[in-house]
């Protein structure tokens, strides 16, 4: 009996039917629709052992990252099909009875996949110490960002901006990812009311794109902080090449250690996701203390849907491979933390659809330069990025997660905000 013949009855029993994916097993046997647009190859039977020991997203992720399975065809379509099957609201939700369980055990023996759990891929994080301590936060950032600037240039493109872009026009109209990233930087700058001579702080400055845009376009003096030495080195060289060294300073520094306020404005773009729920009050209060009265904060962060907070999951692909210790909060929780520190929240804007477009562009960049991305990092690392970015597209499209810009002000004397009455005035041009 071939591997496909052994697996097929279990697929029907557990999933309630066949999936719209063509599966090729290590012995060359196949199952599933011959005309399927998505093809999955089980390269090594070890993939099934990984999934047997971790019958959840972690097992599948380990199999993919290690190269034990390959996914060909439309990745978004394939992941959407797998999500459909796994969704308890629309999938079959079959309960595995004792007969099926016994059949699964016999199949495992027949396939030769019984044995100890395989070693996890090297790309899996192994953090130690107290969650959200300075040392552990630095290790978490290093896991994700110390992959290599050249690798990130392949994925992110020339803008080197690792956050949601702002698509003022459709991508197929000749409007590029780089155009959309500069538009995002300018949107943040206008919301903050930047003007020549102001002193600003960029918390989590990445490779320096926002501080460079703010200094070059608006004439501000900027400080950017990051926990990544690789990012800081890259940003400093860009700043020097742009002739902006007298206006922009880059530091490798934890936000909790910044003590040289006051600043006229603070931008936090794609950084608050690393802070953690327990530290949000500290985060907001510290930024409040760094601003002058009347100064503005722009907090740009991914948000989960409201409801009961999920417990930290040991089976989460994102936590193990992508953003260790990252925590998403609802926009309500974020607004409450910011207002609890003394800020007045003046504007909230969702950019959910913009992030799905941004992620699609990053996936396209990665796939179009796959061999180079692998050479610059590792096959496993490139697979991690492909899987998480494609999965994130589906999550943003479905509304399971979103991204919000929360604009707040530190009230001045008598509660003065310095804000104009309309959004059109706030942004300086049509909203």
Image (cartoon, rainbow, N blue to C red):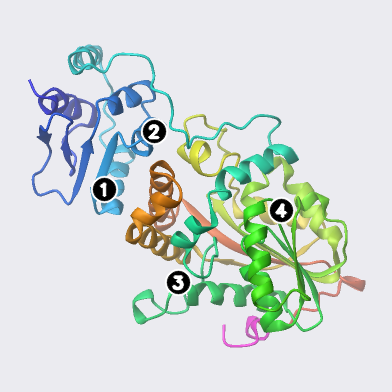
Alpha-carbon span between mark 1 and mark 4:
38 Å
In the rendered image, which residue does mark 1 sit on? 78
Q: Are dots 4 and 2 in contact, CB under 8 Å?
A: no
- Asked if the residue at tag 2 contacts the one at tag 3, i.e. Cβ–Cβ closer than 8 Å, the answer is no
What secondary structure is found at the residue carrying circle 4? helix
Label 3–label 4 contact, CB within 8 A: no
Residue of label 2: 62
Q: Position of residue 132 (x, y in %)?
A: 70, 39
Q: Element type at marker 3?
A: helix
Crowding around mark 4 (Cα neighbors within 10 Å: few <14, some 14 to 19, many 20+) is some
* Quarter of the N terminus within the rendering: top left
Residue plotted at (47% across, 33% down)? 122
3D distance between C-alphas at marks 4 and 2: 37 Å
Mark 2 vs mark 1, CA separation in Å: 17 Å
**Mark 1 or mark 4, earlier in chain:** 1
The residue carrying mark 4 is: 336
Mark 2 or mark 1, which has the lower sequence index? 2
Taking 29 as reference, is 235 above or below it? below
How crowded is the residue under tag 1: few (<14 C-alpha within 10 Å), some, or many (20+)?
many
Taking the spot 82% from the left edge, 59% from the top edge, the residue there is 288
Percent of width and height locating residue 136: 68, 37
Q: Earlier in the sequence, mark 3 or mark 2?
A: 2
State how many labels appear.
4
Of badges 1 and 4, the one in the foreground is 1
Residue at the bottom extreme, as displayed: 429
């Amino acid at each position: 009996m071939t591997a496909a013949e052994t697996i097929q009855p279990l697929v029907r029993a557990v999933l309630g039917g066949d999936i719209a994916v063509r599966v090729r097993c290590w012995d060359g046997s196949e199952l599933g629709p011959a005309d399927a647009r998505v093809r999955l190859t089980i390269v090594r039977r070890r993939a099934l052992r990984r999934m047997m020991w971790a019958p959840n997203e972690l097992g599948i992720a380990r199999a993919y990252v290690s190269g034990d399975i390959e996914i060909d065809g439309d990745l978004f379509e394939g992941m959407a099909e797998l999500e459909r099957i796994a969704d308890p609201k629309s999938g079959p939700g079959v309960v595995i009875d004792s007969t099926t369980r016994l059949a699964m055990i016999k199949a495992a023996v027949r396939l030769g996949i019984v044995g100890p759990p395989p070693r996890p891929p090297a790309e899996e994080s192994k953090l130690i110490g107290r969650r959200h301590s300075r040392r552990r936060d630095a290790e978490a950032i290093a896991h994700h960002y110390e992959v290599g600037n050249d690798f990130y240039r392949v994925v992110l493109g020339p803008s080197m901006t690792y956050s949601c872009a702002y698509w003022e026009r459709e991508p197929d109209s000749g409007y590029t990812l780089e155009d959309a990233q500069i538009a995002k930087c300018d949107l943040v700058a206008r919301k903050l009311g930047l003007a020549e001579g102001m002193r600003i702080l960029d918390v989590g400055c990445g490779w320096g794109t926002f501080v460079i845009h703010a200094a070059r376009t608006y004439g501000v003096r900027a400080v950017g902080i990051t926990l990544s030495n690789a990012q800081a080195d890259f940003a400093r060289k860009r700043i020097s090449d742009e002739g902006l060294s007298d206006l922009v300073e880059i530091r490798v520094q934890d936000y909790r250690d910044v003590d040289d306020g006051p600043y006229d404005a603070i931008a936090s773009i794609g950084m608050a996701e690393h802070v953690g729920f327990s530290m949000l009050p500290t985060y907001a209060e510290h930024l409040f203390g760094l601003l002058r009265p009347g100064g503005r904060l722009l907090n740009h962060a991914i948000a989960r849907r409201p409801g009961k907070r999920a417990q930290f999951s040991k089976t989460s692909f994102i936590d193990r491979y992508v953003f260790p210790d990252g925590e998403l909060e609802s926009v309500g929780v974020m607004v409450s933390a910011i207002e609890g520190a003394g800020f007045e929240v003046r504007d909230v804007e969702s950019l959910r659809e913009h992030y799905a477009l941004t992620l699609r562009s990053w996936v396209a960049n990665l796939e179009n330069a796959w061999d180079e991305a692998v050479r610059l990092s590792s096959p496993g690392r490139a697979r991690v990025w492909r899987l998480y970015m494609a999965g994130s597209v589906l999550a943003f499209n479905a509304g399971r997660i979103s991204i919000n810009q929360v604009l707040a002000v530190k009230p001045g004397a008598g509660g003065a905000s310095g804000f104009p009455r309309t959004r059109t005035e706030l942004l300086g041009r049509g909203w």
